[in-house]
Amino acid sequence: MDKITNFNNFKIQTSTNKNQTNSNEVKVELTQKPDEVVLSTAKDKKKLSTKQKVLIGIGTTLALLGAVGSVLLFTKSGKLKPAKFSEYIEFKPAETMEEAKRFAQENFKIKNYDLEDNLDMANWLNEGLTNLNNQFKGKAHMPRSVAFSKQLKENTPASMTPIFDELMLSKELYCKDLETARQEVEEAIKLVYIVEDGKEFFKPFNGLNSKALSEAISEYKRLMGDKNAKAIDWINLSLRLEDIAVAQTHPAHVLSELSKNEKCMEILKEENIPFNLAELYAKTKEEQKEFLKNIFAIINQKTKQCFHTNAPCRFDNPFNVIYHELGHLQQYKNRSFYSLIFKDLIDPNFTKDFSKQQIAQKISWYAQTSPDEFVAEIFTQMCNGKRIPDDAMDLYEKYYGACL
Ligand SMILES: [Zn+2]
C-alpha cells in the first residue's frame, strides 16, 4: 500500500510495505511552477518557435511604436539608474496594519500596499525589504505595489510583474493559519526524520540532501520550542523543506552533484558506464532522468546506501523569496522593453551549455534553469552578503544583472 501525502507543490509517496528494503523508499513527484510572469496575455501555453516569437514581437512592437517612443523599446541598457532611498533604515515590527503600510510607503514609496489584515506577513515583508535596502545602501529599486494573488497557487510563492513593478504573493500559501502551516511541516518532517528511543534517524528520500535537511530540522526543533512562532515562520520552513526535495528531482542539479561524489564515480567506472557531464547536459531532461534512474539502480544496489549531496538550500534564509523576486525587478529595470518580450532569446542554449551550467551550479539548482533565474538567484546571494565567483558575476552582467 502506498500513501500519497500532498505537501505544497510536491507529492510524497510513502511505501508502507515493511519488507521493502530499498533505501529510496520515498519518492517525490513534482509539479513545480516558475515564478515569472509572462508578458503575453495568451492563456494557451503552446510553445512558440523563436521565429513565431519574433514575428509576434515585431507586430507587438509596431503596434506600440505609435504610443511609446521607439528609442526606449530597442535600447539595450545595462546602465541602471540606482534608486535613492535612505542608506540605512531601522526596522521595528509594526503593531497595526496602518503602521506597516505607512512604513512601506514612507521608506520605499510603495503606493499600493494591500496584504489584507495579515500583519505578520507585512512585518516579514517589510523586514526583508529593509535588509535588502540596507545591503545596497538605498540603491535597490522597490516594487510600486504589493498584493496577494489568488492566481498564484502555493507552488509559486511569489512573482514580480515587469513594467508595473508589482510584487504578488500567493494568497493560498501565505494566508494559511498557524495550525495548518505547522501541521503541514510536521507531516513532511515525519517522512524524513524519526526519533526512536531518544535516537534521531534521517530517512533518505530520493537521495535527499543531508546537510541542508539537518539544518532544516534544527530550524524545526527551534520553532517547536518557540511559543511565539508565527504562521509565516512555519510557511517559510515548509518552503525550505520543499526546496530540498525539489532540488533532487532536477536532473541537471543531481548530475552535477553526482559528479562530485567520488564513490559514485568509482562505481560507474567499475561498471564501465560512461559519465560525461558535458554530453549529459546536452541531452533532454527526459533522457537525463532516464539515465539517472538507471545508474541509481546500480549505485543503490552496490552501496546499499542513498546518494547524498552537500548543496545548500535556496531558502535557508526566510527572506530569500523576497530577495529573489526583487532580483527579477532590478533585472527588469536594467533591460529594454524589447528584451523583456524576447527574454528567451537572451541565451536559448543556457540549459544545454556545459560551462554555463557548471557556473550556475555554484549558485543553486534553480539558477541552472534559465538566465533570468540565474540572475535572480545571484541577486539573492548578494542580498545575503555572499561573495559571488568572478565567472558567475560575468555571466550575471551579461544577462542584465544589476550591479548596484
Ligand atoms: Zn524567479
Image (cartoon, helix red, strand yellow):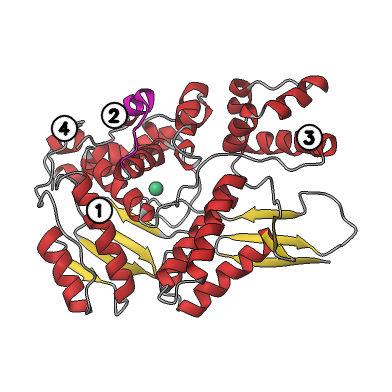
Cβ of mark 4 under 8 Å from ligand 1: the answer is no
Classify 204 as above or below 302. below
* Res 273 → quadrant: top right
Q: Which part of the image, by quadrant, shows the N terminus? A: bottom right
Q: Which part of the image, by quadrant, shows the C terminus? A: top left
Residue 206 image offset from top left, x and y in percent? 69, 48
Classify 241 as above or below 284. below
Left or right of 311? Residue 39 is left
Question: Label 3 is placed on what type of residue?
Answer: Ile
* Res 197 → quadrant: bottom right
Q: Residue furthest front?
A: 198
What crowding class fits label 4: few (fewer than 14 Cα within 10 Å), some (14-19), or many (20 or more)?
few
Q: Nearer the viewer, residue 322 or 328?
A: 322
Question: Label 2 is placed on what type of residue?
Answer: Glu
- Under circle 3, the secondary element is helix
Mark before the other along the chain sequence, 2 or 3: 3
Q: Which residue is under mark 4?
A: 79
Q: Which residue is under mark 2?
A: 397
- Give the residues in magenta: 385-395
Tell me the CA gap for discs 2 and 1: 23 Å
What crowding class fits label 2: few (fewer than 14 Cα within 10 Å), some (14-19), or many (20 or more)?
some
Q: Nearer the viewer, residue 117 or 209?
A: 209
Tell me the CA gap for discs 2 and 4: 11 Å
Q: Which residue is under mark 1?
A: 131
Residue 394 covered by magenta stretch: yes
Classify 144 as above or below 295. below
Question: Label 1 is placed on what type of residue?
Answer: Asn
Number of the front mark, 4 or 1: 1
Tell me the CA gap for discs 3 and 1: 44 Å
Which residue is found at the position 52% from the left and 23% from the top?
354
